Amino acid sequence: MTAEDHTAPELPGAPIGFAEFVCLVAALMALGALGTDAMLPALPAIGEALRVAEENRRQFVVSAFLGGYGAAHLIHGPLVDRFGRRRVLLWAIGAYVVANVLAAVSASFTLLLAARVVGGAVVAATRIGTIALVRDCYRGRAMARVMSIAFMVFMVVPILAPSVGQLVLVFGNWRTIFWVIAGTALALLAWIFLRLPETLRPEAALPIHPRRIAMGWRTALTDRLSLGYMLASTMLLGSLYGYLNSIQQIMFDIFRQPHLLAAVFAGTAATMAAANLLNARIVLRLGTRRIAHGALVALIAIAGLHLLLAEAGWDSLIVFAVLQALTMAMFGLANSNFSAMAMENMGGIAGTASSVQGFVSITAGVAIGAVIGLAFDGTTVPMVAGFLVTGIISLGVVAVTERGRLFGG
């Protein structure tokens, strides 16, 4: 019997209609992704407008956002455990609107990066609040099912965001993209204000006290499942951020097909969405471990094959698109279940635990992704090698976490 199988008091379920709840969770998850993915087609235009000649430096538009996003997790966790999920989400999304307005009017690359750091920092509350919100209502396999369905809906944003960015560039300029993001955040703010009740019970609110917060951090960092799956997720996120940092240059400089960036990106996002739909259908029957561990092994095999082809010079656009789509599908299956397993024993400190897990996995993942992105050498080898290496390390961490009993054994 695994940890996800033990009994626990029944949780209340969604506070609004299930379909609306899942869509709202997906929208909260997608808000940060929109701030990342919509930028990709605009990086050359931003570099030209703000006089950033070195292409690798333009990646900082993405990395600055993700850096702020990861670092702020430690702040938001105690806040959502003290003041509630709804109130923190409202304030954070309001601040995100302001940050994107500042980015839209930035006159220098430095000011733009500062606005991106702030935007990433405040929108990080959506991840903390979302995980705590779902954990208030569900646990174990049920939580994994909700997160998988939400992630499937959420993947519509990575599918559409680069296309939205390209469309905006047809009718406006790169600054207009930030105005679009600000408007989207404002609409989500209204949705939460009108429809989402508070899910944190008043008696469950935790005080903002250094000792209490430190104890929560200690619990999240010493619990075997929380620590192990947090570190495993960190490795996979590092490869994902390496992909985000590299994909624009890969499409522009290697394959010379900049107009296909949105299509290739959409293809990889679509396979991730399909994988999460599959996960939602089978996770209650097969369990999180069997699915996640199997997907991780498959990811390593696909990345290994892709690296061999890339080293041999056989990585055509079609080969790249197909193998990368398969890799991202396995990433989606593994990582969505990793998140649920990391939170299995964290119900009493959901906000604090998710903040610690998010801080470590995203901050370290951004650093790994930056290394992968800056290693770009005119081939796909650094990016593909990133998936292979991080996948192998992740599998090793999972094996230690489960004491060698993989696949739910």
Image (spheres, rainbow, N blue to C red):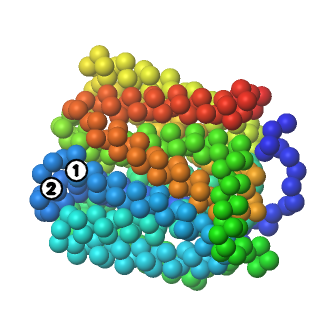
Q: As drawn, is 232 to the left or to the right of 64? A: right
Quarter of the figure that contains the N terminus: top right
Residue 318 drawn above or below residue 138: above
Residue 184 drawn above or below residue 23: below
Q: Pointers 2 and 1 in contact (CB under 8 A)?
A: yes
Tell me the distance, in whole angstroms, between the alpha carbons under discs 2 and 1: 7 Å
Q: Residue at x 52, y 44 (%)?
A: 234
For numbered disc 2, what is the local secondary structure?
loop
Determine which quarter of the picture holds residue 278: top right
Quarter of the figure that contains the C terminus: top right
Residue 215 drawn above or below residue 317: below
Q: Is residue 260 visible?
A: no
- Tell me residue 163's x, y (percent): 31, 55
For numbered disc 1, what is the local secondary structure?
helix
Q: Residue at x 76, y 79 (%)?
A: 202
| Type of amino acid under label 2 | Val
Q: Residue at x 70, y 61 (%)?
A: 215
Given the current orientation, which residue lies at the most extreme bottom position? 194
Task: Tell me how many marks there are.
Answer: 2
**Callout 2: 10 Å neighbours few (<14), some, many (20+)?**
some
Closer-to-camera residue (393/319): 393
Which residue is identified by label 1? 57
Instruction: Say which mark, if any, is on residue 116.
Output: none
Instruction: Say which mark, if any, is on residue 52.
Output: 2
- Tell me residue 17's x, y (percent): 68, 70
| Type of amino acid under label 1 | Arg
Q: As drawn, is 331 to the left or to the right of 134? A: left
Q: As drawn, is 252 to the left or to the right of 384? A: left
Q: Residue at x 29, y 57 (%)?
A: 61
